[in-house]
Image (tube, grey):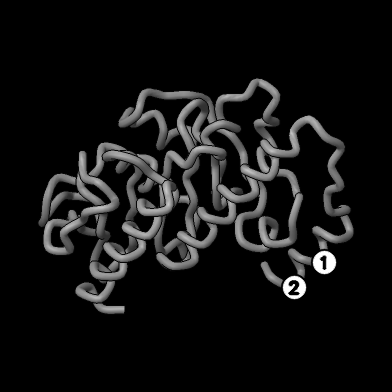
């Protein structure tokens, strides 16, 4: 996908996420790999009202070379590209139910999203939680790099989800799947749940990894 098309696609998908309440105000940020570097939503911008020409352009070393100043969360995006070869996009949202799980003491930090449905296994995989850090603190990048690329998605403690994918569309789909599964987990929190078995999960990973 050429850069102009990718910019337009970023605007379209960001607005879709915003319009459906996956982000509010100026919350959330998105990046995507492009020839010679990266595109990133600008700092203090709304995902519902992006201008394709003002999306930040960074070179391969993450130097800002065009467009508006990039999101202050650039460090956490960079960590995913660094530790997960083949990453083509990263989506960070403040979606309600995933953020709720990031605030609950009962959420397992090593497995925040247990295998409730096949699609969360197929599209998201194991989700770990990293400890809280101030938004924009470079420490967030260190926390994600410490996972050694084992997870395509994480929950930032008391903050929200970050999801990577091989391209922009797959990263958005995975972020949506994570949020909808988190919603199910919150809705079903006080009831007995039937999770997929270890054998079911293994089969899904073998067929769809």
Q: Nearer the viewer, residue 81 or 166?
A: 166
Residue underneath mark 2: 207
Q: Nearer the viewer, residue 188 or 39?
A: 188
Find residue 74 and name its label.
none
The x and y percentages for residue 66 are: 10, 56
Q: How many marks?
A: 2
The answer to the question of whether label 1 and label 2 lie on touching residues, with beta carbons closer than 8 A, is yes
Q: Real-space Cα distance between discs 1 and 2?
A: 6 Å
Quadrant where the C terminus sits is bottom right
Quadrant where the N terminus sits is bottom left
Residue 184 as seen in the image, left or right of residue 4: right
Residue 171 drawn above or below residue 27: below
Image quarter of residue 139: top left
Q: Who's the residue at 68% across and 45% down the image?
A: 184
Q: Residue furthest bottom?
A: 1
Element on which disc 1 rests:
helix
The x and y percentages for residue 67 are: 11, 55
Q: Who's the residue at 25% across and 76% down the image?
A: 5
Residue 30 drawn above or below residue 182: below
Residue 35 as seen in the image, left or right of residue 139: left
Residue 21 as seen in the image, left or right of residue 130: left
Residue 197 drawn above or below residue 139: below
Image quarter of residue 121: bottom right
Q: Who's the residue at 21% across and 39% down the image?
A: 44
- Residue count near mark 1 (Cα–Cα under 10 Å), binned few <14, some 14–19, many ≥20: few
Q: Residue furthest top?
A: 105
Residue underneath mark 1: 203
Residue 201 as seen in the image, left or right of residue 36: right
Q: Who's the residue at 22% across and 54% down the image?
A: 49
Element on which disc 2 rests:
helix
The x and y percentages for residue 181 are: 65, 49
């Amino acid at each position: 996908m050429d850069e102009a098309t990718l910019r337009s696609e970023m605007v379209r998908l960001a607005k879709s996420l915003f319009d459906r309440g996956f982000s509010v105000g100026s919350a959330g940020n998105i990046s995507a790999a492009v020839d010679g570097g990266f595109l990133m939503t600008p700092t203090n911008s709304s995902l519902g009202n992006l201008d394709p020409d003002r999306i930040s352009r960074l070179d391969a070393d993450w130097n800002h070379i065009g467009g508006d100043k990039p999101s202050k969360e650039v460090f956490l995006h960079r960590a995913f590209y660094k530790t997960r070869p083949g990453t083509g996009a990263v989506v960070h949202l403040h979606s309600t139910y995933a953020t709720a799980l990031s605030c609950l003491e009962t959420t397992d930090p090593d497995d925040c999203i247990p295998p409730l449905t096949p699609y969360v296994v197929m599209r998201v995989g194991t989700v770990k939680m990293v400890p809280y850090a101030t938004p924009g603190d470079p420490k967030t990048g260190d926390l994600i790099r410490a996972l050694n690329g084992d997870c395509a998605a994480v929950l930032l403690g008391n903050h929200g989800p970050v999801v990577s994918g091989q391209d922009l569309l797959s990263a958005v789909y995975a972020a949506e799947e994570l949020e909808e599964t988190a919603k199910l987990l919150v809705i079903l929190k006080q009831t007995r749940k039937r999770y997929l078995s270890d054998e079911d999960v293994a089969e899904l990973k073998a067929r769809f990894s």
